[in-house]
Image (cartoon, rainbow, N blue to C red):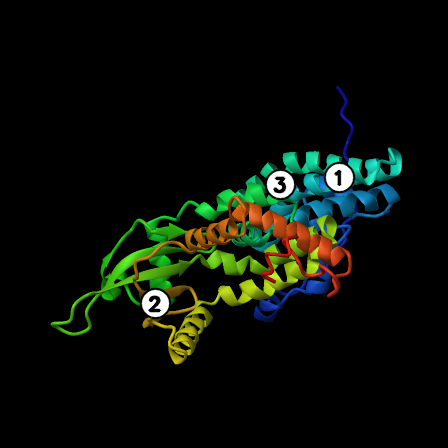
């Protein structure tokens, strides 16, 4: 068998570089050697994204690809803000519950005025039907959000006559009974962080079950530890504010002002006044100073303590989130106000305070809608000349 013979290659001498210590330690040229041995990505961003996304990052950029990139970027931004920004998450939670109520309200008005061309009486009837169904949903939203929304709901349930439709005022009444309290571990942590002292250093005893809880704070009975031997423990009440309320305050009030513009723009100034009022209430050092000033002024005119008794502030335990004052027995302010309203109402021939408030609210609305003035009967709010109380 014949096998093909390999073709001989001509021998050529290849000069080799002499191996020396210098050539062994010579650094490589990074601009050439590394570029030759390491693959370079086609696009700078393609090295930072998963392989399946390279088609979106790399050119050419079509309209469809640009819109898809904008959509994906928006989704990523939304998820990031919702996860890490409490104010943004709070705003989303608010409008997720409020938006359906606003849209339904706008639709009821639009259909009645623009499509069905209803009379004012029919429009008011339809709005009343809407209010009956939306008022409980609004209260449920307030309770879910908690914080400053519950506080404002409590305020409006008290002074809302004439500002809000009666259906909302009635639905907000249960908020006066308070909200579920927070546990002792959370409260003690707030006290210790705010005062810089342990519970044992501050108190001889502390009731873990609060005597009252509200939207921004809750109140506990306690006994101060005596400073010196031989002194008696001092019974006090401690008002402890939830720190997250102040943290979310700006977002909550901004959402409330926007909702007021959509629902009842005529009450926008009331919403702004609520912001100013609650800015001061969230700093307990200001509340403590107000109590001192009020005590001094009433003592100046001989009212305190003969007719009114104001609790004394415990200066050692007074911070932005904690307010300590002496414990006084008494009835709740809302019960005292209701009793006085009932007394005045019966003296004026009304059944109770609720009926009196409804009559006053109706007459005040008529008074201001008609331009007010000091003409005949202009300030006769009760409509009975023998009851000249204004």
Under circle 2, the secondary element is: loop
Which residue is depicted at the point 65% across and 57% down?
254
Under circle 1, the secondary element is: helix
Q: Which of marks 2 and 1 is in front?
A: 1
Does label 1 or label 3 sit earlier along the sequence?
Answer: 1
Q: Position of residue 390 (x, y in %)?
A: 61, 62
- Is the N terminus in the top left, top right, bottom left or bottom right quadrant? top right
The image's mark for residue 311 is 2
Relative to 297, 269 lies left or right? right
Front residue of this view, candidates 64 and 375: 375
Q: How crowded is mark 3: few (under 14 residues within 10 Å), some or many (20 or more)?
A: some
Does label 2 or label 3 sit earlier along the sequence?
Answer: 3
Q: Residues within 10 Å of mark 2 (few under 14, many from 20)?
A: some
Q: How crowded is mark 1: few (under 14 residues within 10 Å), some or many (20 or more)?
A: some
Under circle 3, the secondary element is: helix
Location of residue 13 (image quadrant): bottom right
**Which residue is tagged 1?**
124
Q: How far apart are marks 1 and 3 (CA)?
A: 13 Å
Which residue is depicted at the point 38% across and 73% down?
303
**Which residue is tagged 3?**
167
Q: How far apart are marks 2 and 1 (CA)?
A: 48 Å
Whether residue 15 is visible: no
């Amino acid at each position: 068998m014949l096998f093909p013979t390999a073709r001989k290659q001509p021998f050529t001498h290849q000069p080799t570089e002499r191996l020396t210590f210098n050539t062994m330690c010579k650094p490589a040229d990074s601009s050439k050697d590394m570029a030759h041995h390491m693959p370079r990505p086609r696009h700078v961003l393609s090295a930072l994204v998963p392989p399946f996304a390279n088609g979106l990052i790399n050119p050419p950029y079509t309209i469809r690809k640009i819109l898809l990139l904008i959509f994906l970027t928006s989704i990523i931004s939304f998820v990031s803000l919702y996860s890490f920004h409490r104010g943004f998450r709070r705003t989303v939670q608010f409008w997720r519950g409020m938006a359906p109520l606003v849209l339904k309200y706008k639709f009821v008005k639009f259909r009645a005025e623009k499509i069905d061309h209803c009379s004012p009486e029919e429009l008011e009837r339809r709005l009343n039907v809407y209010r009956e169904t939306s008022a409980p949903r609004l209260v449920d939203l307030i309770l879910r959000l908690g914080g400053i929304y519950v506080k404002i709901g409590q305020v409006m349930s008290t002074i809302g006559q004439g500002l809000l439709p009666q259906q909302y005022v009635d639905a907000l009444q249960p908020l006066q009974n308070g909200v579920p309290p927070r546990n002792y571990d959370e409260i003690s942590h707030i006290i210790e962080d705010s005062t810089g002292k342990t519970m044992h250093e501050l108190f001889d005893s502390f009731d873990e079950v609060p005597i009252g809880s509200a939207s921004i704070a809750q109140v506990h009975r306690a006994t101060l530890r005596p400073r010196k031997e031989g002194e008696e423990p001092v019974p006090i009440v401690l008002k402890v504010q939830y720190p997250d309320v102040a943290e979310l305050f700006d977002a909550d009030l901004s959402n409330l002002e926007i909702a007021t513009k959509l629902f009842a723009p005529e009450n926008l100034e009331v919403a702004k006044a609520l912001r100013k009022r609650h800015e001061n209430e969230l700093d307990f050092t200001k509340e403590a100073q107000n109590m001192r000033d009020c005590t001094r002024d009433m003592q100046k005119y001989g009212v305190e303590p003969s007719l009114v008794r104001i609790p004394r502030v415990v200066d050692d335990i007074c911070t932005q989130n904690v307010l300590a004052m002496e414990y006084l027995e008494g009835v709740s302010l809302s019960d005292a106000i209701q009793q006085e309203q009932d007394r005045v109402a019966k003296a004026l021939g009304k059944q109770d305070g609720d009926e009196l408030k409804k009559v006053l609210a109706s007459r005040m609305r008529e008074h201001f809608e008609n331009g007010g003035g000091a003409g005949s009967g202009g300030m006769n709010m009760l409509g009975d000349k023998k009851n000249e109380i204004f």
